[in-house]
Amino acid sequence: MTDKPKVGLDRSKTGRAKGTPNKTTALLKDAILKAAAQAGDDFGSEGLVSYLQAQAKLNPGPFMSLLGKVLPMQVTSEDGGPVGVVFKTVYETRGD
């Protein structure tokens, strides 16, 4: 005979707390950052910054993709309001 789970057992309170990163993910992230910092020493004295600067020049496509993930998703103006973009044709700008 198989044991059935107890009725009313609240499984939502088990496991990791919400927002806590997976231990393996945290270890991998730390290892990647450490490796990039050490590789950066070959490009200059600033470790990780030197490495990222070199990647920006050597691999601009992937670097821009990374940059897009790091930048804030919502852009606002200096006063906190929305940013307006105005497109003008070549003919419209000749009159300015």
Image: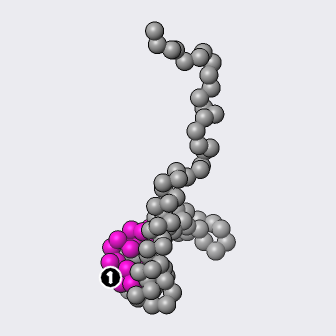
Residue ranking furthest to the right = 79
**Residue 57 is covered by the magenta coloring:** yes
Q: Is residue 45 left or right of residue 39?
A: right
Q: Name the residue under label 1.
A: 58
Residue ranking furthest to the bottom = 44
Q: Give the range drawn in magenta.
A: 51-68
Q: Is mark 1 on a helix, strand or loop?
A: helix
Q: Is 30 rendered above or below residue 6?
A: below
Colour mode? one colour
Q: In this view, does 19 lie to the left or right of 40?
A: right
Residue 75 point in image, percent of width and height: 55, 67
Residue 50 point in image, percent of width and height: 46, 85
The residue under the point 55% across, 63% down is 74
Q: Is 69 rendered above or below residue 87?
A: above
Residue 30 point in image, percent of width and height: 50, 66
Residue 85 versus residue 55: which sits nearer the camera? Answer: 55
The residue under the point 44% across, 83% down is 40
Residue 12 versus residue 1: which sits nearer the camera? Answer: 1
Residue 83 point in image, percent of width and height: 55, 68
Query: Mark 1 is on which residue type?
Result: Leu
**Residue 62 is covered by the magenta coloring:** yes
